[in-house]
Amino acid sequence: MEQIGGKLKDLLKKRKLQSKELGERMGLSKVTISHWTTNFSNPSLEQLEQINQKDASLRTYFLGEADHTHGKKSVQT
């Protein structure tokens, strides 16, 4: 199972966002976002919810309930 940091890093790349941009939107430093993307630390549930509120599709993306790019349910093997 992919960790949150990998999913966040992938999402930033797909959205063509930098850690600094996401940090600014959330009122956090780019270092904090960088720590998340490298799995040095993890966002709190409140911080994940804040990210999810920016885009409704992110909730299922982070929870692994759907394929983010196609909206299809993921099959776990």
Image: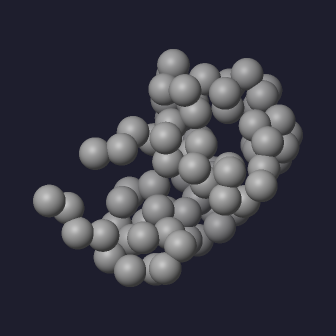
Q: Which residue is painted at 45% across and 55% down in the image?
A: 62
Position of residue 67 in the picture relative to residue 16 (left or right): left
Vertical side of 30 occupied by 1: above or below: below
Q: Is residue 23 visible?
A: no
Q: Nearer the viewer, residue 33 or 56?
A: 33
Position of residue 59 in the picture relative to residue 23 (left or right): left
- Residue 64 lies, in percent from the top left, at 36, 60
**Where is the N terminus found, in terms of image quarters?**
top left
Vertical side of 5 occupied by 74: above or below: below
Q: Which residue is painted at 57% across and 50% down in the image?
A: 10
Q: Is residue 6 visible?
A: yes
- Residue 75 lies, in percent from the top left, at 23, 69
Q: Which image quadrant is residue 36 in?
A: top right
**Where is the C terminus found, in terms of image quarters?**
bottom left
Q: Which residue is painted at 75% across and 37% down in the image?
A: 19
Q: Which residue is painted at 53% across and 73% down in the image?
A: 69
Vertical side of 11 occupied by 45: above or below: above
Q: Nearer the viewer, residue 49 or 24?
A: 24
Q: How many marks?
A: 0
Vertical side of 73 occupied by 23: above or below: above
